[in-house]
Amino acid sequence: MARLVMKFGGTSVGSIERIRNVALKVKREVDAGHEVAVVVSAMSGETNRLVDLVSSISSMHDAREYDVVVSTGEQVTVGLLSIALQELGISARSWLGWQVPVRTNAIHGAARIEDIPCDEIIRRFAEGQVAVCAGFQGIGSDNRITTLGRGGSDTSAVALAAALKADQCDIYTDVDGVYTADPRIATKAAKLDKITYEEMLELASLGAKVLQTRSVEMAMKYRVKLQVLSSFEDLPGTFVVDEDDIVEHQVVSGVTYTRDEAKVTLQQVADKPGIAATVFGALADAHVNVDMIVQNVSENGHATDLTFTIGHKELPQAMKVLEKLRDKLDCKAIVPDPDVVKVSIVGMGMRSHAGVAQKMFSALAEKGINIQVISTSEIKVSVLLAEEYTELAVRTLHTAFGLDAA
Amino acid sequence: MARLVMKFGGTSVGSIERIRNVALKVKREVDAGHEVAVVVSAMSGETNRLVDLVSSISSMHDAREYDVVVSTGEQVTVGLLSIALQELGISARSWLGWQVPVRTNAIHGAARIEDIPCDEIIRRFAEGQVAVCAGFQGIGSDNRITTLGRGGSDTSAVALAAALKADQCDIYTDVDGVYTADPRIATKAAKLDKITYEEMLELASLGAKVLQTRSVEMAMKYRVKLQVLSSFEDLPGTFVVDEDDIVEHQVVSGVTYTRDEAKVTLQQVADKPGIAATVFGALADAHVNVDMIVQNVSENGHATDLTFTIGHKELPQAMKVLEKLRDKLDCKAIVPDPDVVKVSIVGMGMRSHAGVAQKMFSALAEKGINIQVISTSEIKVSVLLAEEYTELAVRTLHTAFGLDAA
């Protein structure tokens, strides 16, 4: 007997038929003797519908009232799934965020979970009852409904698994696991049986959309054994586990990419102290996050190029900030470039293997792909490229690091 | 300065535009210096959509989970209306049933309100905040969401008005008041300025759909001054008040009708003790409510006709029960008749005027309308007629009792 948390996203509960299918999956675990808590999202399309209603009343709405409205999506799903389970003869009841309670801070619309006292749910496990919990929502210190921000149901599931000391947290989704690369681009991509929290965290941050970054952070912190698997096919998925649970680490476990970045170059900016502080301070004040930065050595000791990347959506805002600084910067030109892609390789094995970055650069160079900016961490190397090279670069690196399926 | 409860039904909040219109009506009361609590229903169509979702999962669903799902309709409206009020510069916050709390018993789907502690709402009145409360919902003794049954938002509004000791409870709806008869049938029907609780209660029970019966009962019990008025036109409505607030009572205040009845006649049933007890006992056991009853005097001392009315929808169920009793009843035939209408006259003045019933019967007889069954109470007379006479009977009585507008 194990204690399981099963999480189903919006597409998995997108219709009455799919909710019935979810109930069957839950029944199988119950029949196997497991204690089960289920975490569900809103039916697909529902959260967008609710957000649109709020936006059509006001663009600058009270986040507390936004939470009241959008949290109804999950509320509907938990009721329907509980009824579907009861139809199969399973004892089940719904739990809303305020009922569990899933205690969060009071940052409405982007709340963080602080505590989940779940004695009552555990007591009911002993009576054979399944807990059907609303993802994405909680109750703030102000006794009002909070939401965790889009995609927060993954985080709800992991937090509940941690609170319940569950043996496993299964994230059911519309893909059947974590792949070595996006299979739509790299046709030879293979599904990983296992991946470490650290690798998954890098992949999630670097564009792999299979899990929400915060949920992986939380799983890592509380050592929750995660599995990502398909709602629709009956196949084992990918386990996200502790480093020690993987005997031999691949040098590179995955290749990922994101088009969500934009590049800005300040040409021939004066090479004097304080310029970087001026630029990045002003951007931070305008809530523009800067990702990669590169500053060339100045040729003549006077002027240099300063290049950095920011979120694609923040480019107009960033340009406005920079234009205002123009006089102070004394640069030749401010050149925006939205047509870039960040391609990354991630792998725990990198820590013990020299020359991984070099191998990456060579492989790209051989295909004539120019690298614009580089950034590295202990277990990843990211490069910024012209967007048109996305597919070629991902496939080249997938092959170069021996990830192609046989 | 007064303390007001304003209640808006589903059609009044049926679109973003209409929610904005409601916000303007609330603003006007706030600007006049009043303390305001607003009670709202789900946007029109929304409750039906939610009920359909539940029904498509299971016809025999857990009422607790039904309540979880359908209560989301009002939850959406309170959030949206609060935002709309804030857009107009009004301080407002939403209150869900469990937040107020609106304490009910645990009869899910048809809960009764037991207590509404509203100190916090009153405290916030003093700060100028409008309370936007979800109608139709509460929290049961089991700490789960309850609903009051369809149309329960009227009851929510009156109960809140009683708890807040409000000076007035305004029920905004899609008609502009209570009429002397259904204006679609009696073109000379006039809007009443005032009506007593007792009359309103009879009218509501007898088919006038403008207010939910339970809400009138509660208003009468707690002496809540009610007004029924239009959401869409800017006109005074009808006040539902204490008997003492009306100086001179009309003999008849209104003529109403309902097609929700069906008639059953047991022909030539044995005229012996215990037959009525057998018939109505069996129907009660099958949860069939009997309304009007008439038993003819037997001609030969042996057999008699027993006629009674029940809810239209319950006719098949009732016939099943009666067929099973057939041998025991020893009657010639069991004749169902769904094509009947109950037409009623209601008025406080009836108590002090003799001959009202007689005048009603004569007026109908003059038009050749045959009366099948009669039932009376202190302030109403109801007759059962063939359904085809509905319009003629209503118009005839409206004229006969001097209700036609000049």
Image: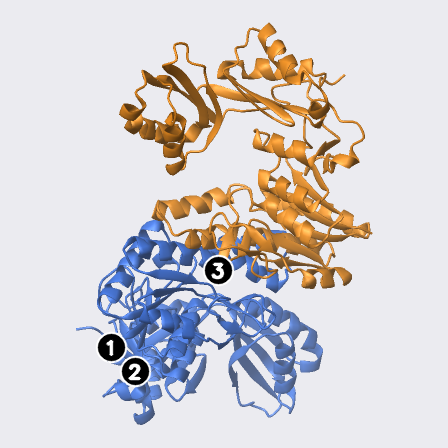
Chain colours: A blue, B orange
User: Compared with residue B221, is residue A9 higher up or lower down, i.e. above or below?
Assistant: below
| Residue at mark 1 | A403
Instruction: Say what amino acid the circle numbered 3 marks.
Output: Arg
| Residue at mark 2 | A252
User: Compared with residue B296, is residue A190 higher up or lower down, i.e. above or below?
Assistant: below
Mark 1 in CB contact with mark 2 (< 8 angstroms):
yes
Instruction: Confirm whether residue A44 shows in the render.
Output: no
* Chain label for disc 1: A
Q: How many marks?
A: 3
User: Compared with residue B243, is residue A158 higher up or lower down, i.e. above or below?
Assistant: below
Q: Seen in the image, is A72 located left or right of residue B322?
A: right
User: Compared with residue B52, is residue B330 higher up or lower down, i.e. above or below?
Assistant: above
* Chain label for disc 3: B
Residue A300 picture quarter: bottom right
Residue A327 image offset from top left, x and y in percent? 71, 78
| Residue at mark 3 | B144
Quick one: A259 or B200, which is closer to the camera?
B200
Mark 2 in CB contact with mark 3 (< 8 angstroms):
no
* Chain label for disc 2: A
Instruction: Confirm whether residue B348 shows in the render.
Output: yes
Residue A219 image offset from top left, x and y in percent? 39, 79
Which residue is drawn at the image coordinates 79% and 27% (left, top)?
B248
Depth check, mark 2 against mark 3: the one in front is 3
Which residue is drawn at the image coordinates 64% and 80% (left, top)?
A331
